[in-house]
């Protein structure tokens, strides 16, 4: 039976923290593949600088396609509305009944698991694999007992910090794969915006 780690995220943009976590899960849990699944609409997250689905997909493909066991799955981009994980898991378990799925989450997400759509059904279908993130404590009550925690060095990189660096005109080299850096530059993603959320032009 193939063991697949599903890694859902906004990936706005994908960064080295995502890739190091995925690589470590692959090795430590003996998985065959990691499928990165970019969300269409993040269920519990608001962002005024969310890159388009196409830009996030292109960055994710650029970030992962030189790794033999990393794949990008577009199932959520093809589905309308908020990208609830339960809908994705129901679809994938139907499509691939012989595969065993687990779902990767950063430690910051664990305390919110009780709020996830149909979480109890979800826990019957998959195992969660979590990792600690700097600045967030892994909740040891409630749902954390359903998460297999990976011990690895914490990586202090977030998409928020990367978007902020771009807005401030700082380099993002070594925080994201080179191909992501190139796409961010070429497509002028995450540039300074006004308080109304509009992109400033160079003449202002
Ligand atoms: N540095 C990291 N280490 C471990 N897990 C991470 C890291 N960055 C993100 N994750 C996890 O990867 C998943 C997808 O993350 P997401 O695409 O939202 O990135 P993010 O850096 O958390 O974004 P943002 O800063 O915009 O909230 C989430 O489960 C998140 O907790
Ligand atoms: O299904 C839910 O209710 C749910 C609530 C919050 C987050 N998720 C999923 O968790 C993954 C990481 O979310 P995010 O917001 O950190 O990008 C992504 O695949 C989301 O669809 C899922």
Image: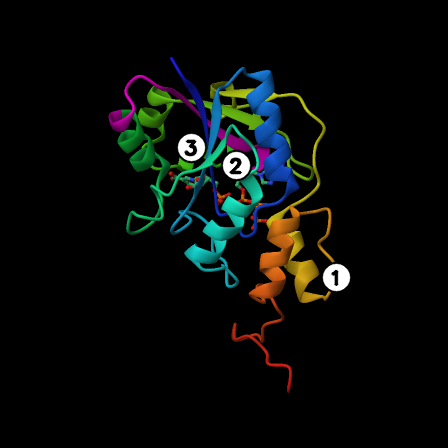
Q: Are marks 3 and 1 in contact (CB under 8 Å)?
A: no
Residue 56 appears at what percent x and percent y?
49, 53
In the displayed orientation, state which residue is furthest to the bottom: 203
Q: Which residues are magenta?
A: 94-109
- Mark 2 nearby-residue class (10 Å; few <14, some 14–19, many ≥20): some
Q: Is residue 107 magenta?
A: yes
Q: Is residue 171 magenta?
A: no
Does residue 158 sit above or below 148 in this rendering? below
In the displayed structure image, the side of residue 204 where residue 109 appears, left or right: left
In the displayed orientation, state which residue is furthest to the left: 94
Q: Which mark is residue 114?
A: 3
Q: Mark 2 to mark 3: distance in Å?
A: 10 Å
Question: Going from the N terminus, do you reach mark 3 or mark 1 first?
Answer: 3
Quarter of the figure that contains the N terminus: top left
Q: Nearer the viewer, residue 143 or 81?
A: 81
Residue 64 appears at what percent x and percent y?
54, 39
Q: Which mark is residue 170?
A: 1
Does residue 137 sit above or below 28 in this rendering? below
Q: Which mark is residue 123?
A: none
Label 3 SS: helix
Q: Looking at the image, in which quadrant does ligand 2 appear?
A: top left
In the displayed structure image, the side of residue 16 where residue 196 appears, left or right: left
Quarter of the figure that contains the C terminus: bottom right
Any atom of ligand 1 within 8 Å of the CB at mark 2?
yes
Any atom of ligand 2 within 8 Å of the CB at mark 3?
no
Which of the two marks, 3 or 1, is nearer to us in this view?
A: 1
In the displayed orientation, state which residue is furthest to the top: 1
- Mark 1 nearby-residue class (10 Å; few <14, some 14–19, many ≥20): few
Name the colour scheme: rainbow
Does residue 98 sit above or below 159 in this rendering? above
Residue 167 appears at what percent x and percent y?
66, 66
Question: Going from the N terminus, do you reach mark 2 or mark 1 first?
Answer: 2
């Amino acid at each position: 039976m193939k063991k697949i780690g599903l890694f859902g995220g906004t990936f706005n943009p994908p960064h080295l923290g995502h890739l190091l976590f995925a690589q470590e899960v692959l090795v430590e849990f003996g998985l065959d593949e990691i499928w990165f699944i970019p969300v269409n609409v993040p269920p519990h997250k608001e962002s005024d600088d969310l890159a388009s689905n196409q830009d996030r997909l292109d960055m994710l493909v650029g970030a992962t396609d030189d790794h033999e066991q990393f794949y990008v799955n577009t199932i959520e981009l093809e589905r309308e509305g908020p990208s609830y994980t339960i809908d994705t898991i129901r679809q994938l378990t139907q499509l691939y009944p012989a595969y065993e799925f687990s779902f990767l989450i950063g430690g910051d997400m664990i305390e919110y698991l009780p709020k996830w759509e149909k979480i109890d059904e979800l826990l019957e279908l998959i195992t969660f694999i979590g990792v600690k993130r700097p600045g967030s404590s892994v909740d040891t009550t409630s749902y954390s007992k359903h998460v297999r925690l990976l011990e690895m060095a914490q990586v202090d990189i977030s998409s928020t910090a990367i978007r902020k660096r771009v807005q401030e005109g700082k380099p993002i080299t070594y925080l994201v794969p080179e191909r992501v850096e190139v796409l961010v530059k070429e497509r002028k993603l995450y540039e300074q915006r006004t308080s109304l959320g509009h992109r400033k032009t160079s003449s202002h």
